[in-house]
Image (cartoon, rainbow, N blue to C red):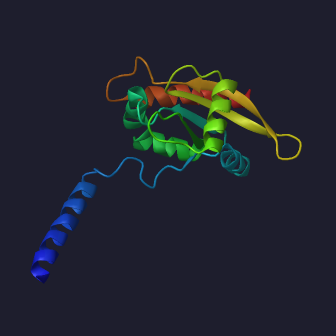
Amino acid sequence: MKKRIILPLLLCIGIALVFRAFGHEPLNEGKLQWHTDLMKAHEASEKSKKPIFAFFTGSDWCGWCHKLQREVFAKPEFIEWANKNVVLLELDFPRSKPLSPELAQQNQSLQQQFQVRGYPTIWVFTTAKGEGNTFSLNPLGSLGYPAGAEKGREEVKFLSDANKVLANRKK
């Protein structure tokens, strides 16, 4: 009985180690921290002095969003850039999975404020402290899927465009 359990277990562990050795690990697992709450992203932004990178997505239906995640966000270059330069905020607009009313309201409010009309859309912005627990949003610029990028090197164009948006902060 023990041999029947141990052998498949060892086989699974071996396969997992082989996949990990060749870089086939789950996308972004443990590498990027995505916030879904604007207030938490704001606090992280204030603490780190980094702008917020807001990703407007339709996680369960938007093919271009999945393509952006796969071809840009999952790449080591983006992960390194994001961890160094921005606080990540995912603003989801799913069709099949429910969001809490508070989260849906927050996302819709930001969608209206930034006049987001399509997905994926990324807005990079800073926040400024207002009265009480309020703050204002200061847009630096927007991004989308890197149109015209060299196939297989989409992250290069995307990061070039993103750095241009970040340069607006220094002006």
Count of marks placed on residues = 0
User: Residue 123, how many percent across, how many down?
Assistant: 61, 29
In the picture, residue 77 is in which quadrant? top left
Q: Identify whether 112 is placed above or below 91.
A: above
User: Residue 88, how many percent across, how many down?
Assistant: 58, 43
Q: Nearer the viewer, residue 162 or 57?
A: 57
Q: Residue furthest bottom?
A: 2
Q: Residue at x 19, y 60 (%)?
A: 15
Q: Residue at x 15, y 76 (%)?
A: 5
User: Residue 104, how many percent across, how many down?
Assistant: 61, 38
Q: Classify residue 110 as left or right of residue 99.
A: right
> In which quadrant will I find the N terminus?
bottom left
Q: Residue at x 62, y 42 (%)?
A: 101
Q: Identify whether 2 is placed above or below 12.
A: below
Q: Classify residue 163 as left or right of residue 80.
A: right
Q: Classify residue 167 as left or right of residue 120.
A: right
